[in-house]
Image (cartoon, helix red, strand yellow):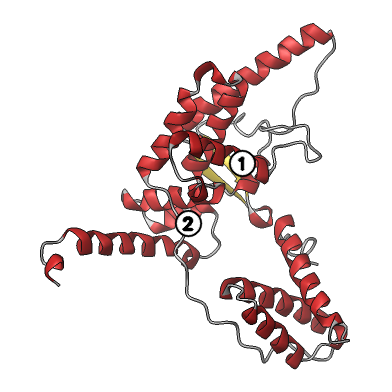
Amino acid sequence: MLAVERGTAKNTCEAYRRDIGHFSAFLKHRAVTLLEVEAVDIRAYLAGLSRAQMAPRTAARRLSALRQFYRFLLSEGVRADDPSGPIDSPRQGRALPKILSEAEVECLLAAVRARGGTRKSIENLRLTALLELLYATGMRISELISLPAAALARDPRVLVVRGKGGKERMVPLSEPARDAVARYMAAQREAKARARLRLRAPQAVPRWLFPSGGRSGHLTRQRVAQLLKELATEAGVDPSKVSPHVLRHAFASHLLDHGADLRSVQKMLGHADISTTQIYTHVLNERLRSLVRDHHPMAARS
């Protein structure tokens, strides 16, 4: 139902599957099936998550999956009630997103450019394109790795991104990002031309902008994350701070720092609700508070 009727993203469906599977495993110890669940069983499950010191945000996500599941069973007439209805969501503070400073992003870019001939050229160009695109567009990593090979065929100044639920949005590309992708694609074409001459056979046209030999046919999220952490080590940036999603946060936060309006950032990130985007204003406010606390002459007296 989620996939076909709502167009829910594959990764979200998999997360629901894992969460409901975890609850089902818990129920086996209580000799209760998913269809026999009562509110007391869900409360016991949440209490167990709390004892295990699971983050309130994760526990709330698992409860959300159960709510969706039991509302679905109720609407289909499989159950006459929704046992998750009386359950309150775990209290959770809204954690501020982790971001990189502009200087740290510059260090990453400088490190990949400084590699020169120490690595295979096409691999350098690919990583440069990945990094530039992540920081220039704020794309989710799932959106980036699934970009088709013809993503920039119509207009290299604008990237059409297919986001959650199959919704498309247009994101303008910066000149450095366009140049990085152009250099990478040119290197790809040259490599394929050499392969054709060597093998004397036509080469398949790649479906993806970032192809790989894996089952999906394109780079995986895990591989991109690994490449970024390796680059962070070379750049002198703490690898634990660097991930594709942190670059998405940096994109949004740095735009707002430089005067972008919240609605435009929302559209470029592909957020359905502007309240999701507003978290970045809290980052900016916290940074301003820190600035006053650390540097204002009156603050030092308190």
Q: Give the left or right position of residue 222, taking residue 260 as reference.
A: right
Q: Residue at x 69, y 42 (%)?
A: 220
Question: How many numbered marks are there?
Answer: 2
Q: How many angstroms separate mark 2 from mark 1 (CA)?
A: 28 Å
Q: Nearer the viewer, residue 247 or 25?
A: 25
Q: Is residue 232 above or below residue 116?
A: below
Residue assigned mark 1: 226
Q: Is residue 134 above or below residue 12?
A: above
Residue assigned mark 2: 266
SS of the residue at dot 2? helix
Q: Is residue 199 above or below residue 127?
A: above
Percent position (x, y) of residue 186?
Answer: 60, 18
Assign the N terminus to one quadrant of the image: bottom right
Mark sitting earlier along the chain (2/1): 1
Number of other residues with Cα within 10 Å of mark 2, as a class: few under 14, some 14 to 19, many 20 or more: some
For badge 2, the amino acid type reads Gln
Q: Quadrant of residue 151?
A: top right
Q: Quadrant of residue 28?
A: bottom right
Q: Give the left or right position of residue 156, taking residue 190 as reference.
A: left
**Mark 2 or mark 1: which is in front?**
1
For badge 1, the amino acid type reads Gln
Q: Is residue 11 visible?
A: yes
Percent position (x, y) of residue 207?
Answer: 74, 32
SS of the residue at dot 1? helix
